């Protein structure tokens, strides 16, 4: 049976050239990039070349890019650095933030939760009120995800950053769900800290970056060495950096038109998935109903009358891989806090996400299989 992968928001298969680029490390010479001998200098040259490619994609100077083991480490490093700079001060975040953001913040500082609307978008008026001097202690950090990882809703990141800068409060943007899917313009955004992940866009797992605003100095999360300009200890993951660079290199070329083209294809396929899903009675889109208010590759739908797990298993038997809730919360078998914050029943939600390798055949397979799966499950009630 042919398989159809519609779970790119969890992880995306490696893009062409990624595995070959990582194999360059195995071909040698293999050495510590921090050493002065020929082998070390060769490894350093490869590492900095990869960093430059990643920085070019992110449109920032390479010295602002701290290579990490992924988005989760980047988030933890951002929270650690901000809270160590303001001990005891609260961290402000919305309940729809990724579990890595919520858990890291709760472990390191008191948290203040801001509400979201029914589309999962945070309320700027509420955030502005919490940033006023009369509202209490000045926060150590404000989180704002670029787009929600479960429903795809875009957040007003520009306005949030502006509010925080005016209040003199550090701001972190989790861009893992948006990086490689839509235009970011990090220089124009001006956030203090931005976390990204390679595997979400077709790079290798276990690789990511924390983009640190120029001039900002925060205490490192990992200590014990002076790597990454003393911002992240531990020998650098050279094969991961090479794979990350290979994934984003083609998206950077030709005035970023390749990325725009991928986004158009993703939006077209997500629209077709939405049409097929909503053709089934009792199925509605969760999140912003306007596609312009969502990242192009994620669609979340609510299916009334059946459990999401049963739908996922039925689709899997039909050769279709999908997901319900966020990748990091599902293993705990807990209801999605994102959907709960939006006032949506988390037990009947289905997330579909496309990527660089998605084809129209994948969409057609869902359109054919989904109605039958739902009908069979409802007939069992």
Image (cartoon, rainbow, N blue to C red):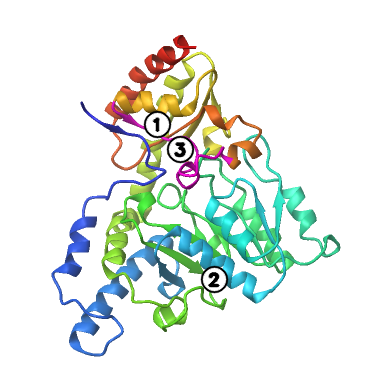
- Specify whether residue 333 is painted magenta: yes
Tell me: 26 left or right of 83.
left
Question: In the structure shown, which secondary structural element does the residue marked by tag 3 occupy?
Answer: strand
Question: In the structure shown, which secondary structural element does the residue marked by tag 2 occupy?
Answer: loop
State the mark number for residue 213.
2
* Mark 2, other Cα within 10 Å: few <14 / some 14–19 / many ≥20: some
Tell me: 305 left or right of 129.
left
Bounds of the magenta span? 319-336
Question: In the structure shown, which secondary structural element does the residue marked by tag 1 occupy?
Answer: helix
Query: Residue reaching furthest bottom?
Result: 36
Magenta segment main secondary structure: loop
Identify the residue at image location x=65%, y=54%: 93
* Mark 3, other Cα within 10 Å: few <14 / some 14–19 / many ≥20: many
Q: Is residue 257 visible?
A: no
Q: Is residue 155 visible?
A: yes
- Specify whether residue 120 is painted magenta: no
Quarter of the image for the N terminus: give it.
top left
Question: Which residue is the site of mark 3?
Answer: 298
Query: Residue reaching furthest right?
Result: 134
């Amino acid at each position: 049976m042919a398989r159809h992968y519609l779970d790119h928001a969890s992880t995306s298969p490696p893009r062409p050239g990624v595995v070959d680029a990582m194999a360059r490390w195995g071909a040698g010479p293999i050495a510590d990039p921090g050493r002065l001998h020929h082998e070390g200098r060769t490894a350093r040259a490869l590492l900095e070349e990869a960093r430059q490619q990643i920085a070019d994609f992110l449109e920032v100077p390479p010295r602002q890019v701290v290579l990490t083991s992924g988005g989760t480490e980047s988030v933890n490093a951002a929270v650690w650095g901000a809270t160590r700079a303001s001990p005891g001060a609260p961290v402000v975040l919305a309940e729809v933030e990724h579990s890595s953001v919520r858990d890291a913040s709760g472990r390191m500082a008191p948290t203040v939760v801001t509400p979201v609307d029914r589309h999962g978008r945070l309320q700027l008026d509420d955030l502005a009120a919490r940033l006023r001097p009369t509202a209490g202690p000045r926060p150590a950090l404000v989180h704002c995800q670029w787009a929600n990882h479960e429903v795809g809703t875009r957040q007003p990141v520009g306005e949030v950053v502006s509010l925080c800068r005016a209040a003199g409060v550090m701001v972190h943007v989790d861009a893992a769900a948006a990086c490689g899917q839509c235009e970011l313009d990090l220089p124009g955004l001006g956030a203090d800290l931005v976390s990204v992940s390679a595997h979400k866009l077709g790079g290798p797992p276990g690789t990511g970056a924390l983009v640190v605003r120029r001039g900002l100095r925060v205490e490192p999360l990992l200590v014990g060495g002076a790597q990454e300009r003393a911002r992240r200890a531990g020998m650098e993951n050279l094969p991961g950096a090479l794979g990350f660079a290979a994934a984003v290199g083609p998206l950077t070329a030709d005035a970023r038109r390749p990325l725009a083209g991928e986004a158009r294809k993703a939006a077209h396929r997500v629209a077709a998935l939405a049409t097929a899903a909503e053709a089934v009675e009792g199925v509605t889109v969760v999140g912003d109903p306007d596609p312009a208010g969502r990242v192009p590759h994620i669609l979340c739908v609510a299916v009334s009358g059946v459990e999401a797990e049963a739908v996922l298993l039925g689709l899997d038997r039909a050769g279709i891989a999908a997901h319900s809730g966020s990748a990091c919360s599902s293993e705990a078998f807990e209801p999605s806090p994102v959907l709960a914050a939006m006032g949506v029943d988390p037990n009947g939600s289905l997330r579909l996400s496309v990527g660089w390798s998605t084809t129209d055949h994948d969409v057609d397979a869902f359109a054919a299989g989904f109605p039958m799966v739902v009908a069979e499950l409802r007939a069992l009630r």
